[in-house]
């Protein structure tokens, strides 16, 4: 299983971090060991003092393919969920300053929190609401219509470089509102009105 992540896919999030709006999807990856075991708390790693939450729609690939055309890309995923791409922002900033890859800041153990998956047919993929609450206060509120690159564009682009296989996951980018987590915070994520994640920070 590959975990493919898209950076800077919402304009306001790119701006809040002082990044340019990309011309093509920004790609990075997480190893399968980044997945947080279902029902577990998230533990802040010892190497960071500034871990941020980033809530994202996640696509689950249902059919393998290479050089997938955008017009047919929607047939390559049947289910969606929500995920949190935890980012060691202090470490990421150090790496970016040196022109180095981000994996240490993005791919550490437990950095990919993933909900159950649900049939995409139950949702309007072009107008899909999702949100994150921290200690009962809404901190992120996103809608798929605000994506710079649609799921179909992402799949078509990614498949030019990586063969997609059944079970691969694609994190599609986070909206504005990312922020730091602290010990004992409670995070809750909603896909439309359905709560799909609920866990504590340790």
Image: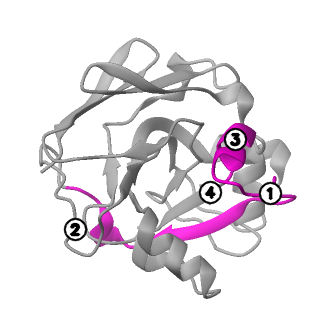
Gap in angstroms between the C-alphas marked 3 and 4: 10 Å
Q: Is residue 39 left or right of residue 5?
A: left
- Residue pictured at 26% horizontal, 75% vertical: 47
- Residue pictured at 19% horizontal, 72% vertical: 46
The residue to which callout 4 is attached is: 6
- Frontmost of labels 4 and 2 is 2
- Residue pictured at 35% horizontal, 16% vertical: 194
> What sort of colour scheme is used for the picture?
one colour
Mark 4 residue element? strand
Mark 1 residue element? loop
Q: Position of residue 31 (x, y in %)?
A: 38, 73
* First to last magenta residue range: 8-36
Q: In the picture, residue 75 is in which quadrant?
A: top right
The residue to which callout 3 is attached is: 10
- Frontmost of labels 1 and 4 is 1
The residue to which callout 1 is attached is: 20
């Amino acid at each position: 299983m590959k975990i493919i992540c898209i950076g800077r896919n919402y304009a306001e999030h790119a701006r809040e971090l002082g990044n340019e709006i990309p011309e093509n999807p920004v790609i990075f990856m997480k190893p399968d060991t980044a997945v947080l075991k279902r029902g577990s708390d998230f533990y802040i790693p010892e190497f960071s003092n500034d871990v941020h939450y980033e809530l994202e729609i996640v696509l689950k690939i249902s059919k393998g393919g290479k050089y997938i055309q955008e017009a047919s890309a929607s047939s390559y995923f049947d289910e969606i969920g929500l995920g949190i791409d935890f980012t060691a922002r202090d470490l990421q900033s150090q790496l970016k300053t040196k022109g180095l890859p981000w994996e240490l800041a993005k791919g550490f153990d437990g950095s990919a929190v993933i909900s159950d998956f649900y049939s995409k047919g139950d949702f309007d993929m072009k107008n899909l609401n999702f949100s994150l609450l921290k200690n009962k206060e809404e901190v992120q509120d996103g809608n798929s219509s605000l994506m710079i690159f649609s799921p179909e564009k992402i799949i078509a682009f990614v498949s030019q470089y990586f063969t997609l296989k059944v079970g691969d996951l694609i994190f599609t980018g986070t909206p504005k509102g990312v922020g730091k987590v602290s010990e004992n915070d409670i995070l809750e994520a909603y896909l439309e009105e359905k709560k799909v994640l609920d866990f504590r920070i340790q």
